Amino acid sequence: MNLSSKELKRQARETLNNRYGLPMLAFLLTQVIVMAISLPFDFMLPTNPNTSQLLIYTLATFIISLLSIVLSCGLIKIHLHMARKEETKLGDLFYFFSHRPDRFLLAGLLMIGIVFLLMLPAFALTIFSIFSHSDILLMVMAVVWIITIVILIPVSFSFSLIYYILIEKPEDSLIEIFKESRQLMKGNKWRLFYVNLSFMGMNILSLLSFGLGLLWVGPYMNQTLVEFYRNVIGEI
């Protein structure tokens, strides 16, 4: 039975009740690590960077985003253990750095590739429009970007479970993982969209609190998404 967003959140709160310390610390550590690695490159980038500086910064950002995927999967592992009342520890955050990290990196690269291919026509038209100085092309470009975004949303939701499945089925091929995610998300994409949308208000309030609220909202949202995954696979 498909649980509502309200029921998934209730399940997440029950799981986190009196156990908020570990997921909160893991969430904070994830943010600090990514920020600590990113800050030097942010500071080194001048106001008007040349081509080489921009390329270095882009490459560094790309590599950091891939590393953050492995960290995020460790975070998912912690929340999965908590949901199943299994023993977990802070060290699980780094578990996948020593357990086939290549699979998570390749999955991330494949996902980036899919998004890039879908956005390529809009990017190409944007560049062409800038140099042509044509108002008609600019309007066409805007329409193409809208269509691209409309296509990207369901596609990204179709593959939103790939990291959960990778954690659960380490021996399956990436093609099988992507196919299974797409199959599981049939009829569930808008449900997941609504779950994410239901946290919008909390995220806005967290930003108004200078990000401190994220220490509570982040684990809550991560746990709710894990409960969504468990519901989709028929575990709850």
Image (tube, rainbow, N blue to C red):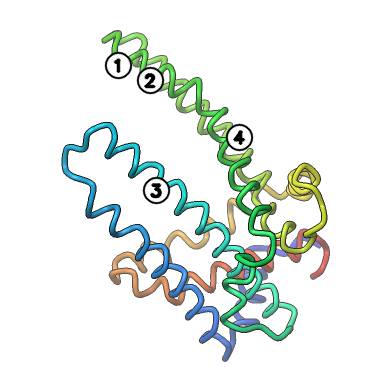
Looking at the image, do the residues carrying marks 2 and 1 touch, with CB atoms under 8 Å apart? yes
Residue 98: give its label. Answer: none
Residues under numbered marks 2 and 3 in contact, where contact means CB atoms less than 8 Å apart: no
Label for residue 114? Answer: 4
Amino acid type indicated by mark 1: Ile
Counting the numbered discs, the total is 4
Q: Residue at x 54, y 67 (%)?
A: 221
Q: Is label 3 in a helix, a strand or a loop?
A: helix
Disc nearest the viewer among 4 and 2: 4
Q: Position of residue 147 (x, y in %)?
A: 52, 26
Q: Which mark is residue 126?
A: 2
**Which residue is located at x 63 percent, y 75 percent?**
78
Residue type highlighted by circle 3: Ala
Query: Which residue position is annotated with label 3?
Result: 60
For marks 1 and 4, the one nearer the N-term is 4
Distance (Cα) linking label 3 and label 4: 21 Å
Q: CA distance from mark 2 to mark 1?
A: 6 Å
Residue named by callout 1:
130
Rendered position, 117 above or below 98: above
- Quarter of the figure with the C terminus: bottom right
